[in-house]
Amino acid sequence: MLSDVIAVMRTGEPRSARVEWAAPWAQEFAAVPGAAGFQVILAGPCWLTRADGEPIGLSAGDVVFRPHGRGHTLADSPATVPAGPACDPRSVERFANRAVDEPATVVLCGGYELAAGRTHPLLTGLPELIHLPAHLGRHPSLRATVDLLAGELENPRHGTDAIVPALLDTLLLHILRAWLDQAPVAGTGTGWAAALNDPPITAALQAMHRAPGRQWTVAALAAEAGMSRTPFARRFTDLLGQPPLTYLAWWRMTTAARLLKASDAPLGTIAGEVGYTSEFAFAAAFKRRFGTPPGRYRRAEALE
């Protein structure tokens, strides 16, 4: 499920850089709609300030994820004002290899550009800020990924260009896993966090993601969940705010958009992969969802 979410929502290559600062320092990360950014504190303390909350003290090992492209500032003190231009989280590579004498703070910065119109509701349901404080023995896979990524950025070698994007996707997966670990247990709460901690609903979601082209019915999805039809439909809708077939229709169109961008398969083939026996019906449904026919959508994506 989580790997599917990343596959449909991310566009282009994620970017990352290892940055060093010596006090006094402050760096603004500009708000960028359609982007998500993270910082991992590798060494030294710093503060995160933002317009929509109190300052947060950060220390080595802390991870911060801003999934909705909101702006914020990192600084040695909440009172330090940024002196330079704002940093676009999509362009963090311009900070690569920046070094200073006796750095007080070392930060791993990264940015993801998200595809407009394909953002998964799991991401839209995330809070404005995810702060994962460092705790000994907590989230060991996340920590291991951070160490690998920091090592590649500090000492680039043959293959680093291929390894870093894969590690960034892995890091994002571990951030989402860590957030889900803190989410409500099955049977409590609503939203995607609660749904992904609910085994029957997760089983139905995985079935839809695994085979979007199958002619699913509510009864068939309920069978995947090991539930009867009516209780399943009620539980799915209560948790996710929409009926199962409504989510299925959204997932089919989102998958189709990704296939149009990533492959040169004929429209009829893509239509069949997402559950349409008629290319005409597929094109009409796609235009309702994205406002443009699939062929024109593919050509526009190719020009970007």
Image: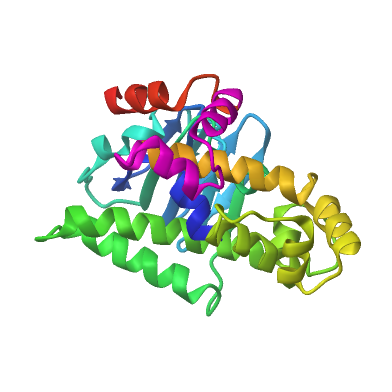
Asked whether 248 or 281 is in front, the reply is 281
Instruction: Name the outermost residue toward the left.
Output: 158
Q: Is residue 142 left or right of residue 68?
A: left
Q: How many marks?
A: 0
- Read off the magenta span: 261-288
Whether residue 201 is visible, yes or no, is yes
Q: Seen from this angle, which residue lies furthest bottom?
A: 137
Could you say where residue 143 lies in the image, as x and y percent from the top left? 43, 69
Q: Quadrant of the N terminus?
A: bottom right
21 or 13, which is in the foreground?
Answer: 13
From the viewer's perspective, is 287 left or right of 203?
left
Viewport quadrant of the C terminus = top left
Q: Is residue 273 magenta?
A: yes
Q: Where in the figure is residue 175, as x and y percent of width and height? A: 52, 59
Residue that appears at 70% across and 58% down: 193
Q: Residue at x 40, y 36 (%)?
A: 267
Classify residue 104 as left or right of residue 290.
left
Query: Is 13 a magenta residue?
Result: no
The answer, for residue 112, to whether it is visible in the render is no
Q: Main secondary structure of the magenta part?
A: helix
Give left or right: position of 78 versus 21: right
